[in-house]
Image (spheres, grey):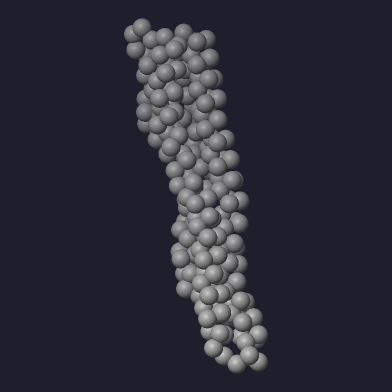
Amino acid sequence: MNLFSTIAHFFQNGGIFMYPILVLLILGLAIIIERAYFITRARRENRILWDRLVPLVNQGDYAAAEQLAADSDTAIGRVLGGGIARARAPGATRDSIETVMDESLMEVTPQLEQRTPFLAVFANVATLMGLLGTIVGLIEGFGAVSTIDAAQKADDLSHAVSVALNCTAFGLLVAIPFLLVHAWLQSRTDSLIDNIETAAVKFMNSLSLSR
């Protein structure tokens, strides 16, 4: 209860700009949870589909491989599914298959990266909102002490500065973790995209060997 009271007191003393930062914190946490779950699931499902597709392609069973990819909603399924469908078409060449898979990869990449950039934006906005709250608090503090007795001016001014800095502190407490998590999620997303590209190259090699 003491910790809760301290946090509540800290939040109340930060001024009105603490509330927009809190909104950014809630939205950012929602994005982090959703993206972490999505990327983790996508990596697992891509690996499962890949392990099932490769034997079919190696056996030359392209119809079953295409159906398996079509039934999957994974990124790798869409990329390889397009390549398999093109490979089954009359007169298919390696270049035409690669072109189809590149187009599919361009379609799925934005879906893998969506919402993650908002974390960097939220971090910057939280920092700026904290600074703005501090500036507004200092302006109000200096305006208030300008009309009081000189003996009380130093104490009241130091209190106003302390209160105003709470907003900056809260903004930085939100911004720093968001930047770190953004870098981590972006790294995981880039790794996922690289894995899909690697799978596409391996698929083309398997296709060439099996044809």
Task: Tell me the residue at 57%/85% (across/down).
Answer: 145
Q: Name the residue rendered at 47%, 50% in the picture.
A: 118
Whether residue 42 is visible, yes or no, is yes
Horizontal side of 118 relative to 152 (left or right) equals left
Looking at this rendering, what residue extends furthest in the left direction? Answer: 90
Instruction: Tell which of 100 and 121 is nearer to you.
Output: 121
Question: Is 157 rendered above or below residue 126?
Answer: below
Q: Which picture quadrant has residue 108? A: top left
Location of residue 127 with respect to 193 vertically, above or below: below
Picture coordinates of residue 198, whole percent (x, y): 55, 25
The image shows residue 35 at horizontal and vertical percentages of 49, 47
| Residue 74 appears in the rendering | no
Q: Quadrant of the N terminus?
A: bottom right
Q: Nearer the viewer, residue 81 or 35?
A: 35
In the image, is residue 162 above or below residue 91? below
- Which residue sits at x=40%, y=20%? 100
Q: Which residue is at a point 53% across and 84% down the rendered structure image?
A: 144
Q: How many marks?
A: 0
Tell me which corner region of the image, top left, top right, bottom left or bottom right, holds residue 8: bottom right
Is 30 situated left or right of 131 in this image? left
Front residue of this view, candidates 47 and 160: 160
User: Where is residue 126 shown, x and y percent of the image?
Assistant: 52, 60
Q: Position of residue 69 (x, y in %)?
A: 41, 27
